[in-house]
Amino acid sequence: MANRLLDTWHRLQRWPAGDWLFSRAVCFKAPYFATIAPRITRLEPGRCEATIRHRRKVTNHLGTVHAIALCNLAELVAGVMTDASLPGSMRWIPRGMTVEYLKKANGPMHAVATPDVALVEAAAGYDLPVGVVVRDRDGETVFRARIAMWVSPRPARKG
């Protein structure tokens, strides 16, 4: 079965600024993510990458990228990766997140989300840990997150 999100990504990649259009569509569907103005740069089963720019809107009182902006970025890439990787018969929801702030986050941030285990179709729900690493422009890891996703079968449609 085709994955609608992944199909949309591939379709928009044919256009100039296709990743920008896709990112705006994701933010339209889940408006809170627009607060960090993310740009999804890569999407494939088992991997999502996105960037955010270092702008005043995402900074803290120290002038660095705010911790919650990094959490928002981590949840975005983990959710998009999960959605693009699951069979159509399954659904997901985040259950929790643990984070590590490793150094001050200065400059543009680049996040990569990958699952710790394979995403599979199942008759019962299961835990899916997703790892996210955020690096600065020098490739230094500034933030790590482990997002606990709950994956379960979609309920049967009535009618």
Image (cartoon, rainbow, N blue to C red):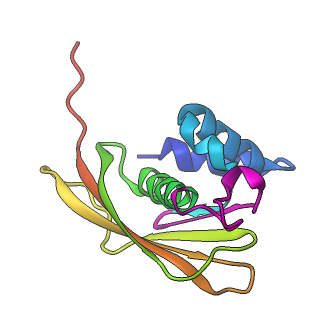
Is residue 106 a member of the stretch shown in magenta?
A: no
Of residues 156 and 129, the one nearer the viewer is 129
Seen as rendered, the residue at the extreme top is: 159
Of residues 128 and 140, the one nearer the viewer is 140
Q: Position of residue 4 (x, y in %)?
A: 51, 41
Query: Is 84 drawn above or below residue 133 in the view shown?
Result: above
- Which residue corresponds to the image point at 31% horizontal and 46% vertical from the top-left? 93
Q: Which residues are magenta?
A: 45-68
Of residues 78 and 71, the one nearer the viewer is 71
Is residue 62 a member of the stretch shown in magenta?
A: yes
- Which residue corresponds to the image point at 20% horizontal and 28% vertical from the top-left? 156
Seen as rendered, the residue at the extreme left is: 124
- Which residue corresponds to the image point at 57% horizontal and 56% vertical from the top-left? 69
Count of numbered tags: 0
- Which residue corresponds to the image point at 72% horizontal and 49% vertical from the top-left? 57
Q: Position of residue 28 (x, y in %)?
A: 62, 32
Evaluate whether residue 38 shows in this view: no
- Horizontal side of 37 relative to 93 (left or right) equals right
Query: Is 11 drawn above or below residue 29 in the view shown?
Result: below
Q: Quadrant of the C terminus?
A: top left
- Horizontal side of 137 relative to 81 (left or right) equals right
Evaluate whether residue 14 shows in this view: yes
Query: Is 72 drawn above or below residue 33 in the view shown?
Result: below
Query: Is 33 drawn above or below residue 118 in the view shown?
Result: above
- Horizontal side of 150 relative to 105 (left or right) equals left
Q: Position of residue 74 (x, y in %)?
A: 50, 61
Q: Position of residue 29 (x, y in %)?
A: 55, 33
